[in-house]
C-alpha cells in the first residue's frame, strides 16, 4: 500500500465470544461490505478466504487469550488490519494489560480517497463505538511513525493507553469519560474541530484532510493543544521514558455500546 492511513483503537472491553462476534460482524457489515475482508488468518501469512456467512473461526481465534484476527482486502491490498486480544491465560504470571482489546489497521491512500476519506473516518468512529474504545486515532502512517517511533527501534512506542495517551493525530476519538478528564469541552475552535460522535464519545480533529497532517501549522496546533490540556498526559517521542499522568481507570465506567 502507498500513502497509507493508519488507525488504532484502544479498549478495556473483554473480548468474549459475544464481543468478538460484534467486532468482526461490524467490520464485515460496514457500508454494505465496503470494509469486508477477502482473506483472514489467526497468524501470518493471511491466505484463508474470509466467509461473510460463517465467522465462527475468526470469532474463536480472537476470543481466546493472546488471540488475534488478521484480515486483508483487495489485491493489491486496499486495506488490512489486526484485532488483538492481549488477555493473558488465568495461569499467567502477570495480569492482563488494562487495554487488552487492541485493533490496528491500514488503508491504501489512493483507495481511501476513492471511497471517501469521510467514509474511512466514519468507519473508525463506528468501530470505536462497537469496541467501546476509550481512545481511537486515524492519521497517516508517516505521522504515526514520526510521533511513535525513533531511530533506535523499528517498533512503535507509547501505544499503551494505560500508561498515557499516545499523542494527538489528524483525527482523535475519546470516550466521554476520557474527554471529561482532559477537559476537552473548553478547547478553542482555533486549535481543533471538536464534536460529539455519540452520547459516549468526542471527536477532535486537526484539519480537513489527512494529507496536511504533517504541515507545520497543524503540528503547532497539536502541540499547543497538548500544552493546554497538560503535556504530561501525552506520550512524547522526544521524552519516551517520561512518566505520564493517567486517569483513575478503575473508577471510569466502560464506554457503552
Image (cartoon, rainbow, N blue to C red):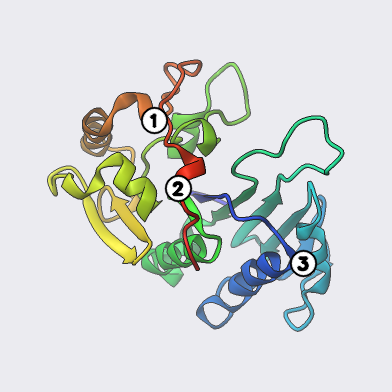
Residue name at image x 21 percent, y 47 percent: 192
Say which of marks 2 and 3 sits in front: 2
Per the model, the C-alpha gap separating discs 1 and 3 is 33 Å
**Label 3 near label 2: C-beta < 8 Å?**
no
Residue name at image x 24 percent, y 33 percent: 216
What mark, if any, has residue 245 been given in the picture?
none
Per the model, the C-alpha gap separating discs 2 and 3 is 28 Å
Asked which secondary structure carries label 1, the reply is loop
- Mark 2 vs 3, N-terminal side: 3
- The residue carrying mark 1 is 234
- The residue carrying mark 3 is 59
Crowding near the residue tagged with mark 3, few <14, some 14–19, many ≥20 C-alpha atoms within 10 Å: many
- The residue carrying mark 2 is 252
* Residue situated in front as seen by the camera: 213 or 30: 30
Per the model, the C-alpha gap separating discs 1 and 2 is 19 Å
Asked which secondary structure carries label 2, the reply is loop
The reply to whether residue 152 is in sight is yes
Amino acid at each position: 500500500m502507498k500513502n497509507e492511513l493508519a488507525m488504532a483503537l484502544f479498549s478495556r472491553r473483554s473480548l468474549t465470544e459475544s464481543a468478538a462476534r460484534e467486532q468482526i460482524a461490524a467490520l464485515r457489515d460496514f457500508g454494505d461490505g465496503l470494509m469486508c475482508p477477502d482473506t483472514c488468518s489467526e497468524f501470518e501469512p493471511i491466505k484463508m478466504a474470509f466467509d461473510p456467512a460463517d465467522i465462527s473461526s475468526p470469532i474463536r481465534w480472537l476470543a481466546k487469550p493472546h488471540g488475534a484476527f488478521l484480515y486483508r482486502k483487495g489485491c493489491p491490498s486496499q486495506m488490512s488490519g489486526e484485532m488483538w486480544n492481549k488477555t493473558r491465560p488465568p495461569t499467567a504470571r502477570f495480569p492482563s494489560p488494562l487495554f487488552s482489546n487492541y485493533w490496528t489497521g491500514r488503508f491504501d491512500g489512493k483507495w481511501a480517497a476513492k471511497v471517501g476519506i469521510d467514509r474511512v473516518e466514519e468507519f473508525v468512529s463506528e468501530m470505536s463505538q462497537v469496541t467501546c474504545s476509550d481512545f481511537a486515532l486515524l492519521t497517516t502512517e508517516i505521522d504515526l511513525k514520526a510521533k511513535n517511533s525513533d531511530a533506535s527501534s523499528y517498533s512503535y512506542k507509547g501505544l499503551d493507553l494505560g500508561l498515557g495517551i499516545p499523542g494527538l493525530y489528524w483525527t482523535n476519538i475519546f470516550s466521554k469519560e476520557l474527554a471529561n478528564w482532559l477537559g476537552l469541552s473548553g478547547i478553542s475552535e482555533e486549535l481543533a474541530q471538536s464534536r460529539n460522535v455519540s452520547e459516549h464519545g468526542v471527536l477532535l480533529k486537526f484539519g480537513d484532510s489527512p494529507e496536511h497532517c504533517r504541515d507545520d501549522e497543524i503540528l503547532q496546533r497539536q502541540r499547543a493543544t497538548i500544552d493546554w490540556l497538560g503535556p504530561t498526559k501525552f506520550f512524547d517521542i522526544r521524552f519516551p521514558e517520561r512518566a505520564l499522568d493517567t486517569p483513575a481507570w478503575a473508577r471510569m465506567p466502560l464506554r457503552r455500546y
